[in-house]
Image (cartoon, rainbow, N blue to C red):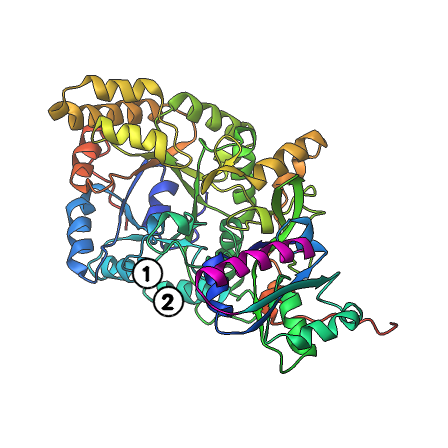
């Protein structure tokens, strides 16, 4: 899922303070799971911003609302009215949602309330871990199901580097060395000999390097 | 092993001599005298001098230009090249640039993570990794072709090296990792600084068992310790470094003014022991900001004079 983190309140305040009618708009799927951008978080953020407006002695009407997903047309149908009411919408969706809203409401002012962080899993409640960079050509079959592109700080295809120490990465002692995990798993699977196979140069054109990507299903 | 390039380092090793290399870090500025002076100080005592490539991710004068400076005064250079800062276009381009000055040695590295340096907010590239860079240089040299398949006019003639760290983890794959680099085509290895000789010997034994010492020249990495503080710093702060407690306490036991001497002594003892390890083909002496000690180490280690190689 997409993991996001609410922007600092001061930064949010700077973007909306000049407007009278503000709608804090949640996105109730990915970023709700990480407790940052769901409809509940939109409600909480709206009340924090109302308090801020009072402190700053600014007259503003700050409301909250939300939909299931800000990245699909169908969910916007029921929310049009409240969106059109606002002078400015503070979207708590990921960057995809913010841009999708801009696409369907060409004259609407939309600000991001979230920093989109990464694609990750829910390691434990409250702990989210990056595990995919959407490179467009999955190599997990070659790396024992552990992705070095998203989980190695140097995205090495033939790691580990010389900085791997006691299973941890050179940049952060809290961070698992992806290649250490790969080696451990290869050994557990009785496939350590596979380690010597050289992973060839990667075709990065399916990744960011190839420019913005699009997927078209002709049959839909 | 047949000689495949005009590299003096390769010829020295192929002739069966224990090779000696050292390294110089370029300055954080554009004064060429810094690199020339460092190199002049040690030129008679080594077969080739590595020029580091923005080591620890701190921006410095580029490795290629510094190698050219050495070439122009007749010193054989080893061009260190990291995959952190260049994509495959820039890597191939810089290899050709070096080849145009007849720089005949290259050391293929991944590079420290940029978070350690002066541009911690910068991007890293890692289009290739060090293993793939080894493959690329060999492909350019042996097949005379670019990665894209086109012919290279006057291909590079470089003796291809890489680093190996027997002290990083997981230990069980450290010899296999060397095997992988050998499979990619590496011809010489310069190891991480060796303080834990037992572990190094174990690694060499594993490498010999895999038949790797028959296929690649291994130069043992040596860094003299200047002080007990440096020993502690290397032990605790430098990623992938293994400085045993005995070494730290031996340095600490010496009075402060005698510590540099003790460091040199430890390094000489290490060289003596390493000379007896089958498969050790020479020494890579990295006297960090202490280049003036290289002549003394080489002489006292019985590695001077260096063989005359045409």
Q: Is there a contact, CB below 8 Å, between mark 1 and mark 2? A: yes
Q: Nearer the viewer, residue B29 or A158?
A: B29
Residue B103 coordinates in the image, percent (x, y): 34, 59
Which SS does the magenta portion mostly show?
helix
Toward the viewer: B229 or A157? B229
Tell me the number on the disc at residue A218.
none
Find numbered disc 1 in the image and state the secondary structure of the residue it sits on.
Answer: helix
Residue B70 visible here: yes
Q: Secondary structure at mark 2?
A: helix
Q: Is residue A41 magenta?
A: yes
Residue holding disc 1: B64
Q: Chain of mark 2?
A: B
How crowded pointer 1 is (Cα within 10 Å; few <14, some 14-19, many 20+) is rated as many
Residues at marks 1 and 2, CA–CA distance in whole angstroms? 8 Å
Q: Would residue A17 be counted in the magenta stretch? A: no
Q: Which residue is mark 2?
A: B97
**Looking at the rendering, which quadrant does residue A135 occupy?**
bottom right
Q: Which sits earlier in the primary sequence, circle 1 or circle 2? A: 1
Q: Is residue B2 above or below residue B203?
A: below
Residue B243 position within the rendered picture, expressed as x and y whole percent measured from the top left = 35, 26
Q: Chain ID for label 1? A: B
Q: Which residues are magenta?
A: A38-59
């Amino acid at each position: 899922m997409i993991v996001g983190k609410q922007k600092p309140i001061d930064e949010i305040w700077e973007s909306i303070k000049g407007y009278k009618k503000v709608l804090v708009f949640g996105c109730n799927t990915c970023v709700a799971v990480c407790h940052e951008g769901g409809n509940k978080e939109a409600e909480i953020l709206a009340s924090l911003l109302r308090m801020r407006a009072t402190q700053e002695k600014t007259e503003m009407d700050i409301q909250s609302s939300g939909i299931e997903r800000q990245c699909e047309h169908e969910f916007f149908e029921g929310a049009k009215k409240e969106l059109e009411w606002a002078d400015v919408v503070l979207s708590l969706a990921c960057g995809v949602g913010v841009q999708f809203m801009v696409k369907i409401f060409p004259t609407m002012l939309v600000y991001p309330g979230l920093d989109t962080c990464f694609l990750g899993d829910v390691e434990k409640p409250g702990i989210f871990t990056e595990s995919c960079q959407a490179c467009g050509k999955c190599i997990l079959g070659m790396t024992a199901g552990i992705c070095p592109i998203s989980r190695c700080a140097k995205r090495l295809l033939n790691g580990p580097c010389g900085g791997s120490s006691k299973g941890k990465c050179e940049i952060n002692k809290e961070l698992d060395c992806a290649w250490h995990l790969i080696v451990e798993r290869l050994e557990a699977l009785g496939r350590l000999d596979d380690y010597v196979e050289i992973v060839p140069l990667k075709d990065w054109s399916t990744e960011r390097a190839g420019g913005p990507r699009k997927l078209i299903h002709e049959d839909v | 092993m047949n000689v495949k390039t005009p590299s003096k380092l390769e010829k020295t090793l192929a002739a069966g001599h224990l090779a000696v290399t050292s390294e110089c870090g370029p300055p954080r500025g554009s004064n060429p005298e810094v690199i020339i002076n460092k190199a002049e100080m040690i030129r008679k005592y080594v077969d080739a001098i590595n020029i580091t490539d923005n080591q620890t991710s701190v921006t410095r004068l580029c490795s290629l230009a510094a190698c050219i400076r050495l070439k122009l005064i007749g010193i054989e250079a080893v061009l260190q090249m990291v995959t952190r800062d260049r994509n495959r276009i820039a890597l191939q381009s810089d290899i050709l640039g070096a080849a145009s000055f007849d720089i005949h040695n290259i050391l293929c590295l991944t590079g420290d993570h940029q978070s350690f340096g002066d541009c911690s907010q910068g991007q890293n590239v890692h289009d290739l990794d060090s293993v793939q860079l080894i493959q690329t240089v060999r492909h350019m040299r042996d097949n005379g072709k670019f990665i894209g398949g086109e012919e290279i006019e006057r291909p590079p003639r470089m003796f291809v090296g890489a680093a190996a760290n027997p002290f990083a983890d997981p230990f069980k794959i450290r010899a296999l990792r060397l095997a992988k680099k050998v499979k990619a085509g590496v011809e010489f290895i310069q190891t991480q600084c060796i303080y834990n000789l037992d572990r190094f010997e174990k690694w060499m034994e594993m490498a010999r068992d895999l038949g790797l010492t028959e296929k690649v020249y291994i130069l043992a990495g040596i860094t003299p310790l200047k002080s007990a503080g440096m020993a502690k710093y290397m032990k605790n702060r430098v990623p992938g470094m293994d400085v045993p407690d005995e070494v730290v306490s031996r340095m600490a036991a010496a009075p402060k003014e005698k510590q540099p001497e003790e460091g040199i002594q430890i390094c000489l003892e290490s060289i003596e022991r390493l000379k007896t390890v089958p498969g050790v083909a020479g020494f890579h002496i990295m006297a960090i900001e202490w280049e003036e000690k290289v002549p003394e180490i080489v002489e006292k280690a019985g590695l001077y004079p260096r063989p005359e190689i045409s």
